Amino acid sequence: MAPAMTHRFNKHYTRDEANALLPEIRRWLAQLDLLLELLERQEQQLSNLLATGNDAGGRLVNGWVRTVAQIKDVLTEFEQREILLKDVSHGVIDFPAFLGGREVFLCWERDEESVEYWHELDTGFAGRKRL
């Protein structure tokens, strides 16, 4: 009896399943963009206050903590589905999948209409090939 194959991921997506998630993923990426922009502003304000020896203030710190928690919530959406967010700024997403019986990634970037590429688990974006 042959040993069972082990896979790196528990969840695997078909191209149709990955494409069906793109509207939600686009929304999550837009949320992340806004939250990361807000976080950067908050950190700049905190840095300016602390550099001048001022107290950072509860409201500003509480806002920063809230923003970090919201970012974590969005990242959890990806994590729970075993979808890998490889590059936030470019919106590069990898979906674990099977292609020709091998475990690979379906690869999508924010400005692409649909999932059209794949790559080996160890090659990354540079190794993308058209489906």
Image (spheres, helix red, strand yellow):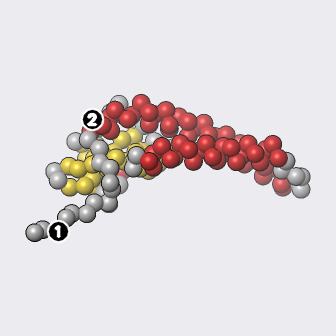
Front residue of this view, candidates 35 and 49 = 35
Q: Which amino acid does label 2 sit on?
A: Asp
Q: In which quarter of the image is the C terminus?
A: top left
Mark 1 element type: loop
Residue type of the residue flagged with mark 1: Pro
Q: What's the residue at 39%, 40% (across, down)?
A: 109
x, y percentage for residue 92?
42, 45
Residue at 85% across, 47% down: 57
Asked if residue 17 can be seen in this view, the reply is: yes
The earlier-in-sequence mark between 2 and 1 is 1
Residue 64 in the image, given as x and y percentages of width and height: 71, 46
Q: Where does the N terminus fall, quadrant-wise?
A: bottom left
Residue 27 point in image, percent of width and height: 49, 32
Badge 1 is on which residue? 3
The residue identified by callout 2 is 16
Say how many tags the image has. Answer: 2
Splitting the image into 4 quarters, where does residue 66 fall?
top right
Residue 8, relative to residue 15: is it above or below?
below
What's the distance in space between the residues labelled 2 and 1, CA to CA? 30 Å
Tell me the residue at 56%/36% (across/down).
Answer: 31
| Left or right: 65 in relation to 94 | right
Where is 76 relative to 29, above or below?
below
Which picture quadrant has residue 102?
A: bottom left
Name the residue located 25 percent from the left edge and 63 percent from the top edge: 6
- In the rendered view, tell whether residue 51 sits above or below residue 40: below
Give the foreground label among 2 and 1. 1
* 90 or 94: nearer the viewer: 94
